[in-house]
Structures are given as C-alpha cells and as structure tokens.
Image (cartoon, helix red, strand yellow):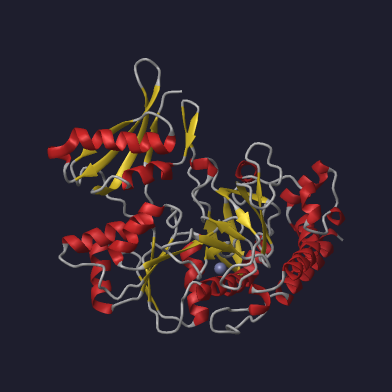
C-alpha cells in the first residue's frame, strides 16, 4: 500500500513536471526561450507554483523519509501545504539538518527521492555539495532531471546571449559539481559547439584560445584573471582575442564592481553568471539579466519562478522578509524528480524585487546580484564583514596585484587580529605609503582596524580554480 502511494505520487509529480515544461525542444523566440513562461504575469506564475506544490508535497511525503519525519515532527499533513501562502508553515531546511541526516543514514541520506531502484533504472549522475566540513551531501539525479536541467539552463543561456555562431570553451575540471555539467547538457540541447577544457594546464588553454578562437569562456573569476595574466606574460594581450563573453561561477563576480571591471578590461569582454546550489538543482537558480547597462546600472540576477519559489528570510529569526528587504535566500525547488526541496536555506544575502524588468521578464530579480553566502561572513571581534568587502578595498588600490589573502590570527595578548596581504609592483619604492592607503581603504569599507602587508608580485600562490582567500588561524 505504502509502495503504491509512493509510486502513484511519483507518477503524478512527473506528469506535473511534463505539463509545465513548455517549449521543451527549442526556443519559441529569438531572445526568450519560452515567452509564455519567461514573461508570464505574476498571477500566472503563482498559479503554476501552487499547482506544482500540490503534486510535489505528497510526492516528498511518500518518497523521502527525511520529509516524512519532518511532517510528523511538525504535526503537518501534505494537505496542509497546498499553496505558496501555506509554505510559511514549513520552517526552512538548512545544510546542517541535511548533514545530520546524511551522517545518520549513510551514504546518501534520505533528503532526496532517489531510491536504489530508481537509480538502477534511470540514474544519470551523482553530484556532491562543495561544503568543506561535515559529512558530504550527495545528490543522485536521474535522466528525467537531466532533461529538465538542460531545458531550464538553455532558457537562461539564451537570455544571457548564447546564440548560434558561438563556440564555448569549458575551462573546468568536470568534477561532481552541478554548474559545468548542467551547462554542457544545455549547450548540447541548443546545438552550440563546445571545446572541453578539462585536464589541461593554463598554458595549454591559452594556446587553445589563440589558435581555435572560442568566443565564450567558462571558468571561475579567479581563473579568468590568472589566465589573462599568463597570456600577457606569454606576450599575448587577451583583450583583442576572439573572446567576447566570460561566463563565470564559483565566486561572486558581477557583485564586486572593481573585480568585475578588472576582469572585463583585461579581456575586453562582458561577464555573465549563474546563481544556484547543488541542493535545489537540477539547474541554475538565477542568471544575469541581458538588459544590464554596464556603465550606469547595478547588475541584477533573474530567478526562474515557474520552476522554483524564491524568497528571503531574516538571518536570525528565519522568518520571511517582504520584497525589497535584504535577507538570506531560500529556495523551494519544483523542477526535479530527485531533489524537489521545500524551503531550503541557500543562504546568500540578497534583495529581491518583483518589478517588471526592462528585458521583458516578469520573474523576481536579485538587485545587485549575489555577494556571498552567509557562511563566508568573517566575524572579527564582533564586527562582521564579507571577504568581498576586503576585496573591494584591495582593488581600490591602484596597481595592486590580482592575488591577495586575509589572515586572521590570535596575538600573544589573546586579541584576534586580521592582516590583509596584497601584491604590488611598487612594493619596494612605495611600500609604507601603499600599506597605509590599503589600511584606510579597508577601514572605510569594513569599519575595523586591520594591518596590511605589501608584497612583491609572485609571492602569493596563484589561484587556479576557486580562490581560498581567508586563512583563519585563530585559537579558540
Ligand atoms: Zn531582465
């Protein structure tokens, strides 16, 4: 009986996914994959979300022991959550809760709906969260997810300017991370050619750019800087190459104005980015708005509301914030067979708006894009700051190198101190003045006194993939 309910709710949910996958095979217009969805009215979007929730909630209850236990603990039944409004009854799910579940039910945990039987029948790929602590949280996705993923990502890529004629160079290691794989399958769906760039060093990648002339690069922001500088050292200027778009992920790019300008100027290319998380895949959560005027406007990231419900919550109380108030991102995922999560705390600070965008899209946007996960927040003697605030200070120092690091340690008197180490060509001739200038820049942005060190170029290790800028050596 229980098995029957698990299967029948699964079939209902899969039929619902199919029903709302409009324009499944190709774009319905030149600049919007599915105008019926991308430009749907706010009322239409909420109606889709409500209908999907009514199928997703019973499916989770019958197929995920993690969700079943949570419903029982909260004294709720699936019928209690039938609309976006009802979601308020469901406290947000965070990573710690999932990690505990993974530790208690190794190796997969019970927070997804993929059983061994489903995996054997139509398993596609297993992905892993990139968190550095605790039990790894893994997600087994199916071929149904792969198709949903390719479709949603293709909608986002088209919006960001991926069109026939482009060649995309994928500078990624192809590890168990959702971003690059999701893009690869979407590009296949769009029939856009790619050059796989896994397993080669930066010099080999530079030579591919010079010789085969890809137009779009996919990499992390740190890597875009690293590769551009390497090309300069090889005697080649990245600016006049064939590359006109840098598709970046893994670290905030658009939200850090000075870094964005530095990378865009180095390559003479525009930056676009995705936003999302492993838990609420299979696909992008957000993508750069194509209507951005880079000289005058702040960047905005579109979220895709027919497939996910996005909201922000207060960091302390975890209660919903009204649109326009800054809070932490929470996602309800309605586009997956394997991981349709209810109110998962993604945890980036964001300010959402539902105002219609100049590009014609009606879905909610994050103004200013995303500046980092709350987990990355540095707490120094009670003062909180993001690493990107320090990054902005470093970039504000004319002539500063690309690499920098933030070292936090406890001094002999038991006081926590922070030192920002930055490379500069004038380190010998002008060291003390540069150091004072950097200290002032940081104090102006972070309202905390820190020490700066100016180093010779090449002192700090070069970032090849994702930058590890913060070294926390505090004793506590
Ligand atoms: Zn837009």
Against 83, is 397 above or below?
A: above
Q: Image check: 262 left or right of 293? A: left
- Find ligand 1 in the image and state its quadrant: bottom right
Quadrant in the rendering for residue 421:
top left
Q: Name, please, the residue furthest toward the front.
A: 296
Against 225, is 357 above or below?
A: below
Quadrant in the rendering for residue 117:
bottom right
Measured as percent of width and height from the top left, residue 429 is found at 12, 39
Is any atom of residue 420 visible in this view?
Answer: no
Name the residue located 57 percent from the left edge and 53 percent from the top edge: 138
Is any atom of residue 130 visible in this view?
Answer: yes
Name the residue located 30 percent from the left edge and 66 percent from the top edge: 267
Q: Name, please, the residue furthest toward the left.
A: 429
Q: Image check: 46 left or right of 295? A: right
Q: Quadrant of the N terminus?
A: bottom right
Against 350, is 412 above or below?
A: above
Q: Nearer the viewer, residue 294 or 275?
A: 294
Q: Image check: 256 left or right of 291? A: left
Q: Nearer the viewer, residue 243 or 210?
A: 243
Q: Nearer the viewer, residue 218 or 55?
A: 218
Q: How many marks?
A: 0
Quadrant in the rendering for residue 194:
bottom left
Measured as percent of width and height from the top left, residue 69 is found at 77, 46
Measured as percent of width and height from the top left, residue 75 is found at 85, 43
Measured as percent of width and height from the top left, residue 356 is found at 63, 67
Q: Name, please, the residue furthest toward the top.
A: 413
Against 285, is 92 above or below?
A: above
Name the residue located 73 percent from the left edge and 44 percent from the top edge: 91
Q: Image check: 41 left or right of 436? A: right
């Amino acid at each position: 009986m229980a098995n029957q309910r698990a299967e029948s709710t699964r079939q209902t949910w899969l039929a619902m996914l199919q029903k709302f996958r409009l324009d499944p095979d190709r774009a319905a217009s030149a600049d919007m994959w599915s105008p019926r969805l991308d430009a749907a009215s706010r009322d239409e979007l909420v109606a889709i979300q409500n209908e999907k929730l009514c199928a997703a909630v019973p499916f989770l209850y019958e197929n995920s022991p993690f969700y079943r236990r949570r419903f029982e603990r909260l004294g709720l039944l699936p019928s209690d959550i039938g609309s976006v409004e009802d979601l308020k009854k469901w406290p947000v799910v965070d990573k710690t809760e999932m990690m505990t579940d993974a530790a208690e039910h190794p190796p997969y945990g019970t927070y997804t709906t993929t059983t061994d039987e489903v995996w054997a029948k139509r398993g596609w790929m297993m992905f892993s969260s990139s968190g550095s602590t605790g039990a790894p949280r893994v997600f087994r996705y199916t071929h149904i997810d792969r198709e949903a993923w390719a479709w949603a990502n293709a909608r986002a890529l088209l919006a960001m300017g991926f069109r026939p004629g482009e060649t995309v160079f994928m500078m990624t290691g192809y590890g168990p991370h959702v971003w690059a794989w999701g893009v690869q399958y979407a590009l296949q769906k769009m029939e856009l050619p790619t050059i796989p760039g896994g397993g080669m060093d930066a010099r080999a990648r530079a030579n591919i750019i010079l010789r085969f002339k890809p137009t779009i690069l996919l990499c992390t922001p740190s890597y875009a800087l690293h590769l551009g500088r390497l090309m300069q050292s090889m005697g080649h200027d990245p600016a006049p190459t064939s590359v006109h778009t840098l598709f970046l992920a893994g670290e905030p790019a658009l939200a850090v104005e000075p870094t964005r300008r530095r990378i865009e100027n180095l390559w003479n290319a525009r930056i676009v980015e995705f936003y999302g998380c492993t838990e609420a895949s299979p696909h992008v959560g957000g993508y750069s708005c194509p209507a951005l005027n880079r000289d005058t406007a702040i960047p905005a990231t579109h979220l895709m509301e027919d497939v996910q419900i996005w909201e922000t919550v207060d960091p302390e109380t975890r209660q919903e914030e009204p649109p326009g108030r800054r809070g932490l991102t929470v996602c309800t995922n309605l586009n997956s067979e394997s991981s349709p999560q209810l109110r998962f705390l993604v945890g980036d600070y964001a300010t959402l708006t539902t105002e219609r965008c100049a590009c014609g899209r009606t879905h909610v946007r994050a103004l200013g894009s995303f500046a980092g996960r709350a987990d990355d927040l540095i707490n120094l003697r009670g003062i909180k700051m993001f690493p990107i605030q320090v990054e902005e200070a470093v970039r504000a120092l004319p002539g500063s190198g690309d690499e920098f690091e933030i070292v936090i340690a406890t001094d002999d008197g038991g006081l926590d101190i922070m030192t920002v180490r930055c490379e500069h060509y004038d380190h010998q001739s002008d060291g003390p003045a540069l150091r004072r200038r950097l200290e002032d820049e940081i104090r102006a942005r972070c309202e905390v006194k820190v020490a700066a060190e100016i180093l010779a170029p090449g002192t700090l290790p070069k970032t090849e993939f994702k930058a590890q800028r913060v070294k926390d050596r505090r004793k506590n």
